[in-house]
Image (spheres, rainbow, N blue to C red):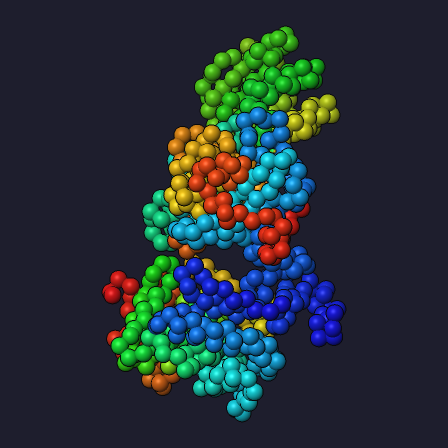
Amino acid sequence: MSEELALSQAERDAGIVRCDACPVLCRIRPGRAGACDRYANEAGRLVRVDPLVLLAKPDLARVAFVEGSDSWRGELGKGEAAFVTGIGATTTYPDYKPAPFIVSSKHEGIDMVTVVTEGIFSYCGVKVKIDTDRYLGPEQATVRAGGEAVGHVTTTEYGSQMLSLGGVHHLTGGSKREGVATCESLLALCNREAVELVIDDGATVVVQADKPPVVNGVLEERMRVGCGSAAIGMFAPQWKDHVDEVIVVDDHITGVLSEHQGGRFLDMKPAGIRVRGRKSTPGRYFQVARPGLGWGGTNISDPLQIIEKIDPKQAWPGLRLLMVSTTGEHSAWFELDNELKPHPVAMPAPVRHVVERIAENCEPALCTVLFMAGAGGSLRAGVTENPVRLTRSVREALTKVTLGGIPAYVWPGGGITLMVDVAKMPEKSFGYVPTPALVAPIEFTLRADDYATLGGYASRAVTLDDVLARTRVRVDEASQ
Amino acid sequence: MSFAAARLADGRLHLQHGPIDLIIKAFGAGAEVEAAYRQAIERFADMLPTLVRELAILRRPVGEAYPLFQGPVARRMAAAVWPYRGVYITPMAAVAGAVADEMLQALVKGRALDKAYVNDGGDIALHLAPGHELRAGIFVESLDGVVRLSYEQPVRGIATSGWRGRSFSLGIADAVTALAGNAAAADAAATMIANAVNIEHPAIERRPARDLDPDSDLGELRVTTGVGALPASAVARALNSGAIEARRLRLMGLIEGAALTLNSAWRIESTGTVLGRAEGI
């Protein structure tokens, strides 16, 4: 490196890199791009912002599930040195010309073709699964980013809350600001950045793919081990010799050990502690409190609030009561005095041990972001002159659809409506256009003879070596 | 690494070298257009290297002595920013427009074209023959404004500046589009008007330019990095401050008109013939 290019010690310490891609010789700070916006400093490394991305061999392990599957006749570059993804392939809209890259390759003697492009998806969104029992907001509530409506709350699943964000109505069916806010949120989520979402009449949650959610400023570390009743069933034998009663507080089903089948089975004596709410079956109670951010997804911060009464005919002085949440995050140990009033006391070690075991059995809470989009319309025209045949070919599993090299789930029924986990895709796979709409890489891989049959641009196919020779590429070797 | 030249699918010429990214289109007889493109490509080859040779001085603020440069683009930059020497400005404020002007000159020289443009990342130099006109759109959130330019009007340059753009801004405008006699003049004016669209407000984040880009010509000056929610009254005050600057520049003859926008609110400074909101045209 010449004198002119050398960085000072202070610059190096600040993480600055020198770009020598053109004579401007920008010094670029970490996380910033140079004057051209084409090269950037990513954690001290000079990277091209928009190159084609190749998945090198280690990454192909990601698509290994095709092995042993007879249904895929169009196997994906397995055994090849690299698979060209659509990232950075660029496209036009509408697609009035063949896709930018139609790459031929040989696999086990069979000629394969991968049509590589970037799709502009006006119909797209993300389905977000947030592992938490905390109450994020009512079903159907509007989810906002930067004050604009970008989606809504859908169902509560086991230990998780689902959100549906984006979709054509938010992207282009509302105000310009709503569309821009939606596009920005989707883009950030798909590129695995954190986005703060505010739910009407609910919580503020920071969502980032493959990272724990942050609910109202609190990091959610664990999923619940099960509902309150399930927790009783799982841990009853371990508690038996150390407690007289256990109440597992849960917004869905609160479990009461001595009334529960799990306790009866162990011949536990009824303790006479009645909890609020609506009894489902013995030892299982719905709606002991309102949903909230306290114990077990309820709004309770003092667990004794859910106790309706203590029956003097059954309870006794000195009775030992454990109250615990479904994640083990909250727990308290009480003993009844002579007036049968509960008093908090220090928890004995064997009980503490089982509480810790609840926590240990909880899986880490994560946010998962699935990109969902429809590859209809003109995108297919970049692949074949006869678009409906592409749809049929995908349907018949002759053509394999990947996004950034990651196999997509294609919905049954009409069209090519697909879903893919953004966390598995290479970094920064997504872009946008001001429509607003998202741009995502998409690749169609199939046998060369099938490609010719469906009216593909077979004569446009180039070899992988040609692509490598002509195009600046980024090789993505990130392992799983 | 040398520059890249490519023809886009619709026939436009794309030239790129480092931060210079040009979309060029000439209208006219086929042979004339092709010859024009060849001239442009030829002129482009040494543009960035020549500019870079004087880059260190081009990044210095203009003072009371007229800055002397060797390169033709650098000279255009100096001429464009000279009227603003009373405040902090460096020739870099006009770099994109000056490149567009220089390339347009190379494109049209000796050629018989109906019209032509060189678009350097939103800063546009235009050529119009008698009887021809060009329309340009202003996209902020969507097509928000339209400029219709004819041979008779004196506008041959359009430039847009704002803190969300590629260059830093001291102001908070989402976009300021200026029309002037050439692209370099429009570029410098848009920069100055965008800087003037400004207020002090806690929702506005600013950082020293040097913290973001060690090479920035703005040095320790604090550039806008974020604009949070602003009350309508604050938006109006910021826009009014920019509109005053735009009027001053128009009355001085430095621009023909300008369109300013912040948070979907607009101010138009114009003689009333050239520039209007999209729905009005």
Q: For the view shown, which residue lies furthest in the bottom direction?
A: B65
Quadrant housing the C terminus of chain A: top right
Q: Is residue A324 visible?
A: no
Q: Position of residue A434 (x, y in %)?
A: 41, 55
Identify which residue is drawn at 50% across, 32% down.
Answer: A398
Circle count:
0
Most foreground residue, A36 or B251: A36
Q: Position of residue A198 (x, y in %)?
A: 45, 45
Most foreground residue, B260 or A212: B260
Identify whether A447 is placed above or below A189.
above
Identify which residue is drawn at 41% across, 63% down.
Answer: B11
Most foreground residue, A196 or B155: B155
Identify which residue is drawn at 59% across, 65% down.
Answer: A34
Q: Position of residue A354 (x, y in %)?
A: 69, 24
Quadrant housing the N terminus of chain A: bottom right
Most foreground residue, A384 or A441: A384
Identify which residue is drawn at 72% across, 65% down.
Answer: A12
Identify whether A261 is placed above or below B130.
above
Can you tell which quarter of the image residue A417 is in? top left
